[in-house]
Image (cartoon, rainbow, N blue to C red):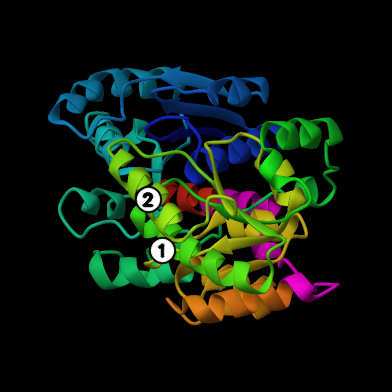
């Protein structure tokens, strides 16, 4: 098959990493993989793994983006993909309108993925216009059914898979570790509690600071690391976090490491990973990655992250927004000498690829019966 994925750009992020990994799996299985985006640092990795990248400015949430409808239509005529898989709203609008201008027999099958609980409006409704819709978790599926015009039989839950064996078999790069500790001497000799996620209020970094203040009272040998870049326009929140760290006297207890491209190694040196989003998150990829690395995870019991933890490591679940209970659970897991982590097949990259390919074949068969 020829499969074309469309997303805004290829910078760091769960959707972006998932797209690159899925494209790589498609190539390994003998399919022709194409990705359209506005580009970014992950393009090199995508191309090295055998996919073709086409740069189009499909990322702007602006009427000007509709100028890409004709270039997209020309691209579809050139590539003639069997499946176009859209992963974001503006790219979905551009692709859908481009397809509408093609003769019906020349239109590719259109699949969309709800990677989040999108706002309920006409702009988001484009994601429900595909031939088939994928939701990345049960909570997203329920949200889509309750808020968009999608028939249950046109909606499938496919968890965003992780290369479990790749994380599980990874060995710590000691040279990398030495470099990290030399650059951050405050981490030496400490048990690291990691909070991954971009700097944004709903990701829960304020909760993490409150939790680390409680942890320090019981275990001063712990050090918190916040790993994630500052979103555009969120500089004021980063300033607020730094001020709150000062108020809680956590200057020697919590470090902000910024955006990193070495998450695999960070999972290995962390004693614990925290997920503290203040609202339901669609999936929570870092939860699965950390568990695949053998690192225990504590998370509030809500959203897609809780679905993952309930299936893989239920002892890490905590009542939502109960920071004291979160700290208590964290300390209990830090004191344990062994952890039972089981990652079911549906959370693995291989499962995502196989299930998605079966869905593609099903959608194509249905279209052949109606064209």
- In x, y percent, where is residue 148? 25, 64
Above or below, 316 against 72 in this view is below
Q: Which residue is painted at 17% across and 31% down in the image? A: 62
Q: Could you say whether the residue bearing mark 1 is in a helix, strand or loop? A: strand
Residue under pointer 2: 243
Give 170 or 190, whichever is nearer the viewer: 190
Residue 7 location (% of width, % of height): 40, 35
Name the foreground residue: 44 vs 278: 278
- Asked if the magenta segment contains residue 126, the reply would be no
> For residue 180, what is the image quadrant?
top right
User: Disc number at residue 155?
Assistant: 1
**Which span is picked out in magenta?**
334-359
Mark 2 residue element: helix
Check the picture and name the quadrant holding the C terminus.
Answer: top left
Residue 223 visible in this rendered orientation of the protein: yes
The residue carrying pointer 1 sits among few (fewer than 14), some (14 to 19) or many (20 or more) residues within 10 Å by Cα, namely: some
Q: In front here: 50 or 99?
A: 50
- Label 2: how many Cα within 10 Å (few below 14, some 14–19, many 20+): few
Which residue is rendered at x = 24% and y = 38% of the image? Answer: 93
Asked where in the image residue 50 lies, by quadrant, the reply is top right
Above-or-below relation of 111 to 208: above
Position of residue 355 measured from the top left corner of the image (x, y, whole percent): 60, 56
Residue 371 seen in the current view:
no
Which secondary structure type mostly characterizes the magenta part of the structure?
helix
Above or below, 360 relative to 313 = above
Q: Which mark is residue 184?
A: none
Identify the residue shown where x is 67% and y is 37%: 184
């Amino acid at each position: 098959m020829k499969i074309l994925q469309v997303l805004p750009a290829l910078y760091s992020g769960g959707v972006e990493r998932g797209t690159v990994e899925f494209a790589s799996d498609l190539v390994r299985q003998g399919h022709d993989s194409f990705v359209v985006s506005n580009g970014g640092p992950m393009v090199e990795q995508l191309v090295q793994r055998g996919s073709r990248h086409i740069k189009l400015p499909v990322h702007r949430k602006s009427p000007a983006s509709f100028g890409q409808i004709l270039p997209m239509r020309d691209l579809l005529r050139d590539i003639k993909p069997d499946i176009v898989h859209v992963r974001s709203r503006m790219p979905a609008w551009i692709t859908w309108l481009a397809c509408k201008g093609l003769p019906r027999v020349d239109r590719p099958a259109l699949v969309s993925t709800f990677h989040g609980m999108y706002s309920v409006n006409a702009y988001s409704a484009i994601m429900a216009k595909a031939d088939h819709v994928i939701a990345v978790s049960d909570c997203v599926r329920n949200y889509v059914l309750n808020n968009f015009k999608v028939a249950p039989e046109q909606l499938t839950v496919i968890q965003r898979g992780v290369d479990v064996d790749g994380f599980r078999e990874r060995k710590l790069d000691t040279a990398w570790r030495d470099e990290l500790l030399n650059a951050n001497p405050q981490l030496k000799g400490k048990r690291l509690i990691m909070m991954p996620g971009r700097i944004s209020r709903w990701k829960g970094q304020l909760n993490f600071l409150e939790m680390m203040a409680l942890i320090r009272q019981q275990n001063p040998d712990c050090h918190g690391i916040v790993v994630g870049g500052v979103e555009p326009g969120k500089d004021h929140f980063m300033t607020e976090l730094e001020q709150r760290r000062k108020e809680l006297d956590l200057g020697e207890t919590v470090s902000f490491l910024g955006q990193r491209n070495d998450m695999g190694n960070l999972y290995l040196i962390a004693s614990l990973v925290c997920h503290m989003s203040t609202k339901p998150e669609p999936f929570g990829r870092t939860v699965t990655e950390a568990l695949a690395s053998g690192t225990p995870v504590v998370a509030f019991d809500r959203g897609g992250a809780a679905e993952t933890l309930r299936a893989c490591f239920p002892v890490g679940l905590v009542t939502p927004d109960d920071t004291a209970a979160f700290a208590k659970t964290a300390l209990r897991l830090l004191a344990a000498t062994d952890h039972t982590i089981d990652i079911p097949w549906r959370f693995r990259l291989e499962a995502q690829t196989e299930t998605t390919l079966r869905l593609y074949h099903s959608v194509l068969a249905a279209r052949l019966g109606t064209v």
